[in-house]
Image (cartoon, rainbow, N blue to C red):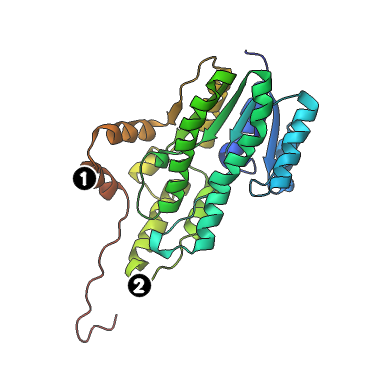
Amino acid sequence: MTTPSTVLITGCSSGIGRATALRLNRAGHTVYATARRPETLDGLKAAGIRTLRLDVTDEESMRAAVGAVEAEHGSLDVLVNSAGYALSGVVEGAGPEEVRRQFETNVFGLVRLTQLVLPGMRAAGSGTVINISSIFGRYAVPGSGYYNATKHAVEALSDALRLETAAFGVRVVLVEPGPVRTTEFGTTYVANLGAAGPDYEQFNRETADYFDAIYTGSRRTLAGTFAIHSDDVAKRVEKIVRSARPRARYPVGLLARSTLALRRVAPDVVFDNLFVRRLFPVPRRPRPRTQGDHR
């Protein structure tokens, strides 16, 4: 095993963040698991994992968490940016505050926390920043435009940061999971589907049913068949932490690897028609009502 690292992980109340905290703790690393609500971390604390309150939309809590780790260890070895959620629904339907909140959590919080840990990593001449992105950081689908946009932003920022920090011994790595079977993320995604007028009612119903099937396994779908679990992503993060020379990005799962390979070679019209429109719900123009049709 490599020398144990000091690791700070965001979004540990459930899903990928929680699985990563447990796996890295078992591997002998010093793990600081964080979440907006510390009471959601009681199970991790019982497993011997250090826990801290950290809200990625709150500057004071981010500074306090980083300060607490650095006061004890001098600098942070690994930052895993896992906190995030998905704002679902068509682009036309979201209000400005909803969109700002989505970017505050998924992008701006990630950036600010990374800024706070980089001085210590640079001074130490080493460090790893692991950003949990998504296959949707490489393409977008109907009903997830804003969430997809945040993951595209994380990809671009990570690419720039990787080049900016390499000379200081800091590595920046993207993890790009395919669909992850996690009830809490899926429940939030479906619940976030807002009304956007009658033209999108059927699309919203189909989208809610489709993603509920993926995340909960309520019925069989192609994406659900190849859905991965949170620990599959955590296992990849553990390998990155151990690696002396990690790659820039790691798709996780067969669906992620295959669809991203297709995205690289297929023109947009081919990718849209042969993949997106076949695999995901898309809005359709409502059938015009005829006279006497009261449905």
Q: How many marks?
A: 2
The residue beneath circle 1 is: 269
Are the residues flagged by discs 1 and 2 in contact, CB closer than 8 Å? Answer: no
For image coordinates 30% across by 56% down, the residue present is 282
For image coordinates 51% across by 32% down, the residue present is 233
Q: Residue 135, how many percent across, how many down?
A: 41, 38
Query: Considering depth in this image, is 262 or 61 the residue closer to the camera?
Result: 61
Drawn side of residue 288 relative to residue 225, left or right: left
Give the mark nearer the N terminus: 1 vs 2.
2
Residue 53 tag number: none
Dot 2 alpha-carbon crowd within 10 angstroms: few under 14, some 14 to 19, many 20 or more: few
Drawn side of residue 189 relative to residue 79, left or right: left
Judged from the image, the secondary structure of the residue bearing numbered disc 1 is: helix
Query: Considering depth in this image, is 279 or 106 the residue closer to the camera?
Result: 106
The residue beneath circle 2 is: 198
Q: Amino acid at mark 2?
A: Pro
From this view, report whether residue 84 is shown above or below residue 125.
Answer: below
Quadrant of the rendered structure where residue 287 is? bottom left
Q: Which of label 1 and label 2 is nearer to you?
A: 1
Dot 1 alpha-carbon crowd within 10 angstroms: few under 14, some 14 to 19, many 20 or more: few
Judged from the image, the secondary structure of the residue bearing numbered disc 2 is: helix
For image coordinates 65% across by 24% down, the residue present is 121
Query: Considering depth in this image, is 138 or 42 the residue closer to the camera?
Result: 138
**Residue ranking furthest to the right:** 72
From this view, report whether residue 194 is shown above or below residue 32.
Answer: below
Q: Amino acid at mark 1?
A: Val
Q: Quadrant of the C terminus?
A: bottom left
Residue 91 seen by the camera: yes
Drawn side of residue 265 relative to residue 119, left or right: left
Q: Quadrant of the N terminus?
A: top right
